Amino acid sequence: MKLFNASVYANRRKSLMQAMGQGQFFFPGAVEQPFNYKANTFPFRQDSTFLYYFGFAQPEMAGLIDADAGVSTLFGHDIDIEEVVWMGPQPTMAERAGLIAVEQHAEFGTVAEVLKGKKIQYLPPYHADRILYLAKVLGKSVEDIQSDHSMALVHAVIKQRSHKAAEEITQMEEALAITAAMHTQLRKATSAGKYEAQLRGIAEGVAFANQGRLSYGAICTVQGQTLHNNEYHRMLKEGGMLLCDIGAENQMGYAGDITRVYPVSPKFSAQQADIYDLVLKAETESIATVKPGVKYMDIHLGAARIITEGLQQLGLMKGDVDESVAAGAHALFFPHGLGHMIGLDVHDMENLGENNVGYDTSVQRSTQFGTAYLRLARPLETGFVLTVEPGIYFIPELIDMWEGEGIFKEFIQYEKLKPYRNFTGIRIEDNVLVTENGHRVLGVPIPKVRSEVERD
Amino acid sequence: MKLFNASVYANRRKSLMQAMGQGQFFFPGAVEQPFNYKANTFPFRQDSTFLYYFGFAQPEMAGLIDADAGVSTLFGHDIDIEEVVWMGPQPTMAERAGLIAVEQHAEFGTVAEVLKGKKIQYLPPYHADRILYLAKVLGKSVEDIQSDHSMALVHAVIKQRSHKAAEEITQMEEALAITAAMHTQLRKATSAGKYEAQLRGIAEGVAFANQGRLSYGAICTVQGQTLHNNEYHRMLKEGGMLLCDIGAENQMGYAGDITRVYPVSPKFSAQQADIYDLVLKAETESIATVKPGVKYMDIHLGAARIITEGLQQLGLMKGDVDESVAAGAHALFFPHGLGHMIGLDVHDMENLGENNVGYDTSVQRSTQFGTAYLRLARPLETGFVLTVEPGIYFIPELIDMWEGEGIFKEFIQYEKLKPYRNFTGIRIEDNVLVTENGHRVLGVPIPKVRSEVERD
């Protein structure tokens, strides 16, 4: 158990009360999720907003912030002797209340009674069990619970959590230190004959050894063109590449999210090197433009332009660059967004709605294939932390479909793509803080220049 | 994706139809469980009963076994090009149907329509999302869904899954081979100055590297007296012990569950050696009595007797052994059950009810502290696989409470327990198949004799 100073939580709750002005806000903690039966659970993960205001990463807890009375209540248990036998001694609720400076604490079982008759606001539940729980403690139907969440509360929480305070940046740097250690091991261990699962296992072991865990389902694959690969059974072969999109969550719940590509043979091939350098150029030049006031949509489109120009130079695309980017022809090779907010969640606050987090009145979500997947598009503000992660992929199924349907044949040199059918894909990603004057790449540097990534 | 021969699944479904005689049985697959928002999920784990009859370990699937018509239906998706971009190519539903020899397949979205008007039997859901899902597709209330499951189906499934077939034993041996590799690394890596998390990380890496994963939340702790330790932040110190209760689940979902205790210093102390040898004696002598027809309750009580006799010899207990075991005095030191069924779940079929799996009309569940936690008590049958896992712990909080209340002072030498307050605990566990003539310890032998566990 690790917490910030009590005043951090008190100040966060006070800020929320001030932002909302009035009202009573209920934050149920998460519940242990069954693996294959109720008592065999996945490792517990606390709800991030509960962590933000109440800090504790144990199940069977909830919090109430009462802006009308100006007090907060922590709900939880004092454990009995049988629980000591199974779980060991735990702090009392009175001690817990002190650790996060809440004015009141109460037994978890009294939640329904305490909330009764109050006009309670809550965030949209993303776990089925929290839907059933809210229905029970608020005395509403399952249908009403799913529609009656408070959008005012959603926006206030997003506004607050979007700006990372200094103590949060320290935590994110720690998550990235663990992530860097994972990538160091991955880079060293990449070699022909090993299996993807072995590499992923090494990285996961490093996360655990540092009191962390994976902040999301790691991608550790020789088939980098499959964007969300959840299989790890393939063998690394000479001439191939291992794409590792992997990050640690540290003990306090903050996420890292870093992608690197390692050649299986010591060096990249000439074909791989060309694409690698182009992706790296898109990444570093995109990072260079990060500063307050710039729309992330524009940085995304800037990356699409760099990729389009580079692929034209390699003879794989053609035509007017502006028209090509506006039409979305690059999405054959770069079919995802440039990045997303990151913090207590790897896609920060995604449970509160991607558009609420990443878009505002100044920028509309695109419906164009590729850019439609962009999770962050709004103007950047000081304190935002985001990922920058361009990629270039050769997806045989998509190439065949587009070529067959004659899509964008004015921009794509389909006949030149044959030698790239087994290329797979390359993505490079870092985590960037928006500062008053520009930006700072968080964490210790993780090798990404081609010569540093290659082995002797 | 790895499956048994198609006929294995066809035969299992046919056996269920025959056992039930008539009726229609619906088995929803599991759903991906959110970690901190809907799209960031824990690694998918298929429902074990779905795996048993339908084999596929992918989400958004369901199965219907229709004993009236003598046919089964697999529900799932054929994926589109956008899904190929994110997930890579997948087998078609027609191909999947062939792989498990189901007569029919249908789009997952048509489940409600297909089930409409039918009298559907289902197993009790243990995931909140499956409660909501069943309510939706069966057109029932959330409350009715939780009470209307079929007990006839529960008993038929338990009866079938309790007897492990040869092809299942092969899988369990594979899970145990991975588990043995994990323990080999743990034994070698145990040394002062390391952290519990590092050791757990090493073991988890080995599981992944072998296409497996942990079959339950590993216990890897220097505080073995806390039975379900989920923390890993402590450092290993000279003179201490590392209790590792850890097992792999192999690619097909079968579990291993093995406990060993490693000395942090190369050798155990004399005090540790005495308790170690006593636990090992309880384990090996309990295993020796495993055969068809014997009640596991009796084997559990036999272990309690061995522990009581041994603790008397060490001067920690006293009085009549029969009376002591009958009263449950040993539970101060051995406060849990001797073991449980194991198979596709580490506590096999626990979602269908512990008492339905482990008890029958011949043996009632005890309410006595300690033995009340025994999950398996019924007479053993050929083909059962179970764990044998006695332990001796010194739990300061429990000792203080019992001593303060004067509990069992006729059996426990409280004044002799002082030198054991920081002992922690020892448990030794293997997985055992009940054979026609007796038993077989599954898996490659994992060192457990004291001299094999100690290091040079």
Image (cartoon, coloured by chain):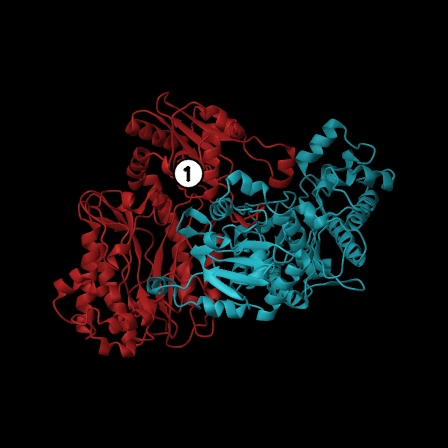
Chain colours: A cyan, B red
The residue depicted at 64 percent of the width and 59 percent of the height is: A16
| Left/right of residue A249 with respect to residue B8 in the rendered view | right
Q: Nearer the viewer, residue B38 or B235?
A: B38
The residue depicted at 29 percent of the width and 50 percent of the height is: B386
| Left/right of residue A233 with respect to residue A38 in the rendered view | right
Image vertical order of residue A96 relative to residue A422, above or below: below
Q: Residue B25 location, x and y as percent?
A: 38, 30
Image vertical order of residue A129 relative to residue B429, above or below: above
Number of marks drawn:
1
Secondary structure category for the residue under label 1: helix
Residue B220: quadrant of the picture: bottom left
Q: Nearer the viewer, residue A84 or A182?
A: A84
Q: Residue B10 location, x and y as percent?
A: 38, 29
Q: Residue A302 location, x and y as percent?
A: 81, 49
| Left/right of residue B1 with respect to residue A445 in the rendered view | left
Amino acid type at mark 1? Glu
- Label 1 crowd (10 A; few <14 / some 14-19 / many >=20): few
Q: Nearer the viewer, residue B154 or B49?
A: B154
Is residue A20 among the parts visible in the rendering? yes
Q: Residue A194 location, x and y as percent?
A: 54, 52
The residue depicted at 19 percent of the width and 63 percent of the height is: B306
Q: Nearer the viewer, residue A258 or A242?
A: A258
Q: Chain of mark 1?
A: B
Is residue B2 among the parts visible in the rendering? no
Image vertical order of residue A60 relative to residue B106, above or below: below
Residue B288: quadrant of the picture: bottom left
Image vertical order of residue B262 relative to residue B439, above or below: below
Q: Which residue in the structure is indicated by mark 1?
A: B143
